[in-house]
Amino acid sequence: MSEADGLVRLRQPIGVTYNWSAGPNATSHLAGLMNGKFVGKRCPSCALVYFPPRNGVCPKCAKILAGDVEVGPKGTITTFCIVNVPFLGQKIKLPYVAAQILLDGADISMQHLIQECEAEDVRIGMRVEPVWKDKSEWGPSLENIQHFRPTGEPDRVMGTESGAS
Amino acid sequence: MALRDIAIVGTVQRPSEVNSTFTSVEILLPVIQQLLDKVGIERSDIGFWCHGSCDYMSGQPFSFVAAVDAIGAWPPIIESHVEADGALALYEAWVKIQTGEVDVALVFSNGKTTSGPIDQILSLQTDPYMVAPLKPGFDALAALQARACLDAGVMTERQMAEVASRSRRDANNNAIAFTKGNESVEELLAMPYTMNPLRAHDCATPVDGCNAVILAAGDIARRLAERPAWIRGIDHRIDTQRLGARSMIESSSAAIAAQKAGVGNDRIDVAEIHAPYTHQELLLRNAMGLGESTHINPSGGALVANPLMAAGLARFAEAAESIFAASADRVLAHCTSGPMLQQNLVCVMEGE
Ligand SMILES: [Zn+2]
């Protein structure tokens, strides 16, 4: 408690530790990332492949996902955002690109960074591939990937398929 | 405007467990599917979905958004969430049906109570300026209340032990319950204090769990259930958050809610009371005017399984099931939340 400028200030740090469980359906996904693989799950009802497997269920059909499906590692940019605004705790040099990437074989996109090209060259349909961090830094996380970079392959024409929007 | 007749027509509860390794969505989905199958309707028949849960239980902001995955949101649905017990979600669904916009609602709730230090987590809901900095444990606050009640002669430790003994015995017949036992009152009184004057059996068992119920209006309810549990009165009242400004030896909010819900208008056969501590059951029985003729907590109550945010809706499910089974004609369901019975929701249901 301090009384500078006549105001009484109170600091009360609060910390609570939880045992968080990813659940059986997300476990193979997280284990896959620790082995450098992208593992998604297929909906037994509509056959869509979820990567990441969300909360272990298909929200469209309300069914528990079943069956691992390896996807990627390459993918296609479905939409993106060029970040020009600095903010507290920023680690990446501006401007940078955050993109939705539809991994090959998956039906929903995931968000990641695009690097190793000019921000102005990033476009919808651009083919990208992951650049993994050093294995010693890997954990059960998509942060194992430093960023995605262009493959140089011809662009993919994005239609109305799932995940394309 | 005349009120519509609205009833609970079906319930499902997941058996209690501790340290569940499933996500909330993974445990909710099968319960909701089981309920739809039991009542014999499709997801598309549900006009309104309402969910009760609390981010502090899961330790994740906006965790309730994920729960929408469990109900299937395509084609688009009308849904809502309360950061509270599922009993409050039921109240919202009841209001929604009263508006005439929808006829059928599915209410669900879940709580992973054992994934964090629940005694600390619950104390975070106290007044952030004057009380929370003292970091009072939830059990400690309840113990202060119990001590005040004992000192004022409102109850005895023996009566508290009687509540625990009865609840643990009744739990033997309830597949959902977690803590079971056959101890006599004398055996329980011989146990050591864990937080004087509370003993371990005076405090509810935190568990992970979830449940769901379906509400329907008028003839739809009569078609979906053989003997619907008609909601005849429902009311929610809150005592001041200033703990020092409250009487610890009575519950004025429970008393008003019970009166407004019409508890005293006729005999109550079964009362499912959400009392996380034995002395709170005694306080609530006094406040709601429940006498010897009422069977209290045949399920064992929250004392033997307290999935926070689902334990209040569980009382509705248990009370409604006794109407379905025709083992009771007029029942009471109650839900509390907050330190020392801060909030109380009371509902009276009847069979036809
Ligand atoms: Zn599906």
Image: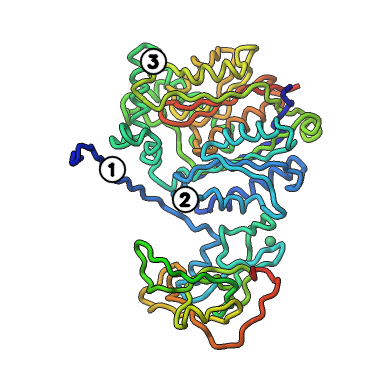
The foreground one among A121 and A68 is A121
The answer for how far apart the CA atoms under marks 3 and 1 are is: 38 Å
| Pointers 3 and 2 in contact (C-beta within 8 Å) | no
Badge 1 and badge 2 in a common chain: no
Badge 3 and badge 1 in a common chain: no
Where A107 falls versus B238 (above or below)?
below
For mark 1, what is the residue? Answer: A12
Q: Quadrant of residue B290?
A: top right
Chain assignment, label 3: B
The foreground one among B72 and B302 is B72
User: What secondary structure is marked by label 2?
Assistant: loop
Crowding at label 2, few (<14), some or many (≥20) Cα neighbours within 10 Å? few
**Residue type highlighted by circle 1:** Gln
The foreground one among B225 and A86 is A86
| Viewer-side label of 3, 1 | 1
Rendered-image quadrant of the N terminus of chain B: top right
Badge 3 and badge 2 in a common chain: yes
Chain assignment, label 1: A
Q: Tell me residue A52's x, y (percent).
A: 55, 66
The foreground one among B19 and B9 is B9
**Residue type highlighted by circle 2:** Pro
Crowding at label 1, few (<14), some or many (≥20) Cα neighbours within 10 Å? few
Where A142 falls versus A152 (above or below)?
above
| Residue in view at x 40 percent, y 73 percent | A94
Locate ligand 1 by image quadrant. bottom right
For mark 2, what is the residue? Answer: B61
The answer for how far apart the CA atoms under marks 3 and 2 are is: 42 Å
Q: Tell me residue B352's x, y (percent).
A: 76, 21
For mark 3, what is the residue? Answer: B156
